[in-house]
Amino acid sequence: MSKFKENLVNYQNLTRKIRDFFYSRQVIEVVTPSLLDAPTTDVYIDSIEVSVNHALSKSSKFYLHTSPELEMKRLLSKGSGDIFQICQVFRDNEQGNINSNEFTMLEFYRVDFDMHQLMDEIQELLVVLGKNDPVQKMSYAQAFFDFSDIDILNSDIEELKKILQSLGLNSDYDWIEDIQTVLFVHLIEPKLKDIPVCFIYDFPKHQAALAQIDGLVANRFELYIKGIEIANGYQELQSSEDYRSRFNQELIKREKLSKSIPAIDEQFLKELSSSSLPFCSGVAIGIERLFMLTSL
């Protein structure tokens, strides 16, 4: 068998094992639309716009989904229970050796799971996929204490700017979450290369995205394999009001960064106002990165 065909077979086996893992746990596989009426509001992710039906009397504008997140949350709000999906996703303005405008994503949601239970299940999935390395878990704050001696949760923006300056890094940032991220990339991620499998959890509240907040931290985690991030998970927001607030925060920041200001998905919010999300946790995993790193 050629190396090319061997890779195809191994990739097929990976996705089959993932599906079998969830089928055995009665997690329902779903398919949701890739063409959406509204683009993402995420500050650092851009949607790809497409126009269709040009030959008809009226063309229509849609956006390729950057993840199936909101469409899957619609299903959760309607009582789907535990669900998963493997699909292609599309993002504009992506570059780098491990970034692409199109890639494959595994996204799944577990009802009545907190984020620690979800991390445990991901660890079990990794074992099924042949990744039996010891797993280390540390909070975002603990990672900074261990690897840089910085109190990341209790340092204000000016204190963190001084640290950037002492490292010879650009300190011209308006938001503390951007400085925290730059410090994480420069001081923490290089250390994670020496850890086979590592979960970083309890991100600072300013990096909550669509995760629940508990005091100074967000119920959010990321999974790193040999220093490469492959998963981003949340203990999910539940109410329409919370989602609207987070979307608006993202739009304010996009405007200040001179980025396009998309319309909020009002239909999603309307559906959640009638029936909010159940208590659940969810995660998105990059399949190509997972394949690359579980093959090592």
Image: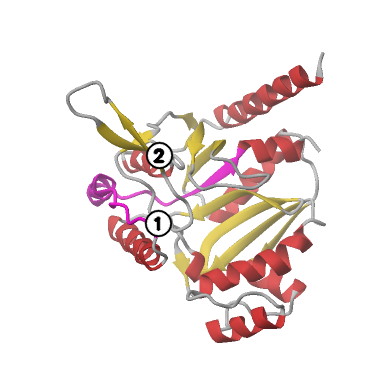
Q: Name the residue: 62% across, 77% down.
A: 152
Numbered circle sitting on residue 237: 1
Q: Secondary structure at mark 1?
A: loop
Does 225 sit left or right of 256 as displayed? right
Near-viewer residue (77 or 172)? 172
Q: How far from the left and from the top, in percent, is residue 20?
A: 61, 26
Question: Where 230 falls versus 34 (above or below)?
Answer: below
Q: Residue furthest top?
A: 1
| Quarter location, residue 288 | top right
Near-viewer residue (232 or 135)? 232
Check if residue 270 falls in the magenta segment: yes
Q: Name the residue: 35% across, 66% down.
A: 252
Mark 2 vs 1, N-terminal side = 2
Q: Amino acid at mark 1?
A: Leu
Near-viewer residue (236 or 289)? 289
Does 172 sit left or right of 125 as displayed? left
Question: Where 6 falls versus 272 (above or below)?
Answer: above
Q: How far from the left and from the top, in percent, is residue 135?
A: 75, 52
Magenta stretch bounds: 259-286
Report how many numbered discs are placed on residues in the image.
Answer: 2
Q: Classify the position of the C terminus by image quarter.
A: top right
Question: Where 264 falls versus 14 (above or below)?
Answer: below
Q: Which residue is mark 2?
A: 72
Task: Mark 2: give few (<14), some (14-19) or many (20+) Cα within 10 Å.
Answer: many
Whether residue 85 is visible, yes or no, is no
| Quarter location, residue 162 | bottom right
